[in-house]
Image (spheres, rainbow, N blue to C red):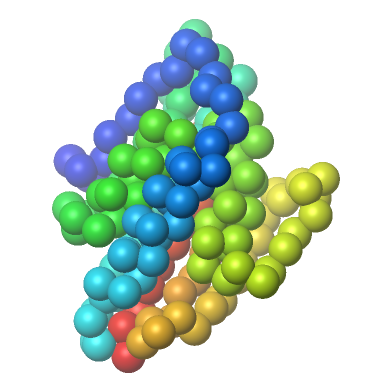
Amino acid sequence: MKPYLAFVVLSAIAGAPTARGAESLCSSLREFVNSVKPGETREFTFYTSWGRGFDASSEAIAAKGCSHGDYLPAQKVCDYLMEHGSVEFAENNVKQALGCLSPETRLAPTLRLRRASFSLSIGRSLVELEFYEDPAIGGMAFKVSADGY
């Protein structure tokens, strides 16, 4: 495990983010994407596990963690997700991020994602949003990468 990967085990589930909280996610995501210089690739991955911790023997009901590669703009997004990101309905993090980066894109509120991949061209970056089950972690992973051009 990389040293910059931080995990928090939850004993309670936080409510849905407020509109102001959603704007914090949007502004930190836009800052992350816009910070990537031509020829650079930056990414972060937000991990969640509902019904158990990342360690199968853990008695926690949920866990979340985020890797950001010690890149400050990615760390800001991770900080937001660690505090406000959904664990039980992890796909909501993807839907919210997609709405931040592509405001005219709407997914039905009742749509359940088990695996998804979106590619967007934003400013001078190709942005990939991926959502998938990560068996190495024992939960779901939401990865955002930006390739500057």
Quarter of image, res 115: bottom right
Q: Quadrant of the C terminus?
A: bottom left
Give the side of residue 16 with respect to residue 73, left or right.
right
Q: Residue furthest front?
A: 20
Q: How many marks?
A: 0
Q: Quadrant of the N terminus?
A: top left
9 shown above or below 135: above
132 or 68: nearer the eye? 68
105 shown above or below 75: below
Quarter of image, res 28: bottom left
87 shown above or below 21: above
The residue under the point 20% across, 43% down is: 4
Q: Residue furthest bottom?
A: 149
Q: Is residue 93 visible?
A: yes
Instruction: Tell me where residue 47 appears, x and y as whole percent.
Output: 45, 41
Give the side of residue 48 with respect to residue 69, left or right.
right
The residue under the point 46% across, 41% down is: 21
The residue under the point 60% across, 61% down is: 99
Q: Is residue 137 visible?
A: no
Instruction: Tell me where residue 129 appears, x and y as whole percent.
Output: 52, 64
72 or 21: nearer the eye? 21
Quarter of image, res 50: top right
The residue under the point 45% across, 57% down is: 26
146 or 25: nearer the eye? 25
Instruction: Tell me where residue 24 appears, x and y as whole percent.
Output: 40, 48
39 or 78: nearer the eye? 78
